[in-house]
């Protein structure tokens, strides 16, 4: 079960594609977009991360950090980043620490096969560390734009929450 708006965002520390550590609580004081995606270099994940990369300057103007998280390791993230020119930090979660804390490691079904995997959800976390938006990426094209628009509204009025 995914977390809901108004819940405290679970803190996590994960290694980035550049070898640094990213701790969510270190970003307090500004909005943070946490994009959970399924797998490096898969079709939908490429599109989603390219859209977030294209909009990254707009998020930065708002003072918002944007990170992507998937279960692949740092080396896989580096190859994915370099192959597609991605600019947002990609966080490695092979032990499923953040993915599980956010309730996103779930049973999925594709073409009649059931398997465990990451549910594609993006969280908008406010400056106080509370979940202000939950965006299930049922349609990938335009997903990053929706999250940007919610971030713009949040920055204008920090008391607003979006789904």
Image (cartoon, helix red, strand yellow):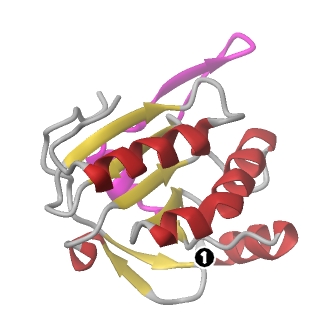
State yes or no: residue 11 in magenta.
Answer: no
Q: Which residue is mark 1?
A: 74
Residue 62 higher or lower than 1, as above or below: below
Say which quarter of the image contains residue 7.
top left
**Residue 49 visible somewhere in the drawing:** yes
Q: Please state, as top left, top right, bottom left or bottom right, where the C terminus lies in the image.
A: top left
Q: Count the labels in the image.
A: 1
Residue 126 higher or lower than 67, as above or below: above
Say which quarter of the image contains residue 31.
bottom left
Q: Position of residue 28 (x, y in %)?
A: 20, 72
Which contiguous range is marked in magenta?
Answer: 93-117
Residue positioned most to the top: 112
**In the figure, is residue 14 to the left or right of 43?**
left
Q: Residue at x 60, y 37 (%)?
A: 143
Q: Residue at x 42, y 66 (%)?
A: 62
**Residue 92 visible somewhere in the drawing:** no
Q: Residue at x 74, y 39 (%)?
A: 44
State yes or no: residue 108 in magenta.
Answer: yes
Q: Position of residue 108 (x, y in %)?
A: 54, 23
Mark 1, residues whose alpha carbon is within 10 Å: few (<14), some, or many (≥20)? many
**In the figure, is residue 53 to the left or right of 124?**
right
Residue 23 higher or lower than 2, as above or below: below
Q: Please state, as top left, top right, bottom left or bottom right, where the N terminus lies in the image.
A: top left
Q: Position of residue 95 (x, y in %)?
A: 42, 61
Name the residue nearer the viewer: 100 or 11: 11
């Amino acid at each position: 079960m995914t977390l809901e708006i108004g819940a405290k965002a679970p803190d996590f520390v994960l290694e980035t594609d550049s070898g640094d550590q990213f701790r969510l609580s270190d970003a307090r004081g500004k909005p943070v977009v946490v994009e959970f995606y399924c797998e490096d270099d898969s079709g939908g994940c490429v599109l989603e991360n390219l859209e977030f990369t294209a909009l990254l300057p707009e998020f930065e103007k708002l003072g918002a950090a944007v990170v992507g998280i998937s279960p692949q390791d740092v080396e896989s993230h580096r190859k994915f980043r370099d192959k597609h020119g991605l600019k947002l930090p990609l966080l490695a979660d092979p032990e499923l620490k953040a993915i599980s804390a956010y309730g996103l490691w779930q049973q999925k079904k594709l073409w009649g096969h059931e398997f465990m995997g990451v549910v594609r959800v993006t969280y908008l976390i406010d400056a106080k560390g509370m979940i202000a938006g939950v965006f299930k990426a049922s349609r990938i094209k335009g997903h990053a734009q929706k999250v940007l628009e919610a971030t713009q509204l949040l920055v204008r009025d920090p008391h607003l929450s979006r789904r």
